[in-house]
Image (spheres, rainbow, N blue to C red):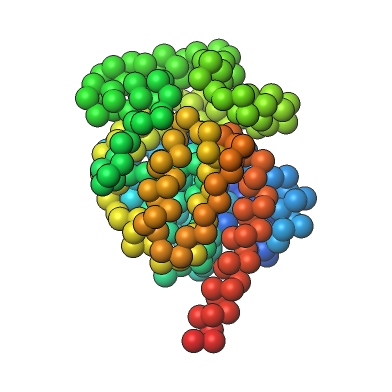
Amino acid sequence: MARAALSRDERELVFNSWGDPQGHPVFLLHGTPGSHQGPRPRSMVLYQLGIHLIAYDRPGYGGSTRSPGRQVVDAAADVEDIADHLRIDEFSVVGRSGGGPHALACATKLSHRVRSAAVLVSLAPPDAPGLDWFEGMTESNVREYRNARENLTLLKSTLVQNADAMRADPMALLKNLDGEMPDVDRQVVADAGIRRMLHKNFMAGIKEGADGWIDDAVAFSIPWGFDPTEITVPTLLWHGEDDVFSPVEHFRWLARRIPRATVVLEPSAAHFAAVPVLPKVLGWLREQARADAAATTTA
């Protein structure tokens, strides 16, 4: 059952947790649009991995209070407030797709508490030097992010219409994206189990409207409020080479600049392949956290 914590500025943050309560804590930061109900391994798998998985609705999604004008960096404070509510001192973070930049924020700003981080199919910052941010990106995403920068009224109108369509048909988003997906993505989302998880995720996220989706699009398109090159914790960057939603050059830009990064580029994968790879990633996070803690103790 979902619970709620209060942020330091007294907003409500709705979250839930699964797996082994005594296991290694990992915050899962959901995609865009999304919710704390986003795709995740079954509790039995989490127990086997020794993982206590925690996910929350970003402001404006699901049951979490909207925070107008939020930046990507603000996710670090929200995650820390939930960790304090749960009395968790140290933890790991993983972000998939739209959750990737927010996981990078946590790794940068919470290095005193984050023991390891993983970022799957993430965007790079919009002001990334030397990066053509829109190159290789699908038309629908280009329109969305250009509107976020140049025409906020049109962005709001479009995403409100999209959210309304999804409430009538939760798979409307995937249907609209079908013509832009590479074949490898179509194969992933054709799986009945993954489609059920995505259905639940989308419905929970936009049940009250499109505010979270709008605020995410804007947050990705303005300065994030932190520098990913300052990350010092062990960080896994995972990407599919054929990704058209978060183009592979975004991954390469991050891979060249994040110290201690472990990089995995799958040549026959795209954006949605980040869903089934999550159990393996959680195992990596647990082992890196243990190794980091052991090294700290020895030092």
Q: Which residue is drawn at 63% across and 55% down?
A: 282
230 on left or right of 244: left
Up-down: is 149 above or below 285?
A: above
Q: At which x and y percent is residue 42?
A: 73, 45
Q: Nearer the viewer, residue 272 or 225?
A: 272
Identify the residue at the far front of this view: 267
210 on left or right of 21: left
Q: At which x and y percent is residue 73?
A: 33, 50
Q: Which residue is drawn at 54% across and 84% down?
A: 297
Would you identify the image quadrant in which residue 86 lies? bottom right
- Residue 156 visible in the shown view: no
Up-down: is 220 above or below 186?
A: below
Q: At which x and y percent is residue 235?
A: 49, 59
Identify the residue at the far left of this view: 150
Q: Which residue is drawn at 76% across and 57% down?
A: 48
Q: Nearer the viewer, residue 37 or 124?
A: 124
Which image quarter holds the N terminus?
Answer: top right
Q: Which residue is drawn at 44% across and 35% down?
A: 247
Total of numbered circles in the picture? 0
Up-down: is 138 above or below 264?
A: above
Q: At which x and y percent is residue 149?
A: 24, 29
Q: Which of 64 and 80 is in front in this view?
A: 80
Q: Nearer the viewer, residue 127 or 170?
A: 127
224 on left or right of 183: left
Would you identify the image quadrant in which residue 203 lies? top right
- Residue 250 visible in the shown view: yes
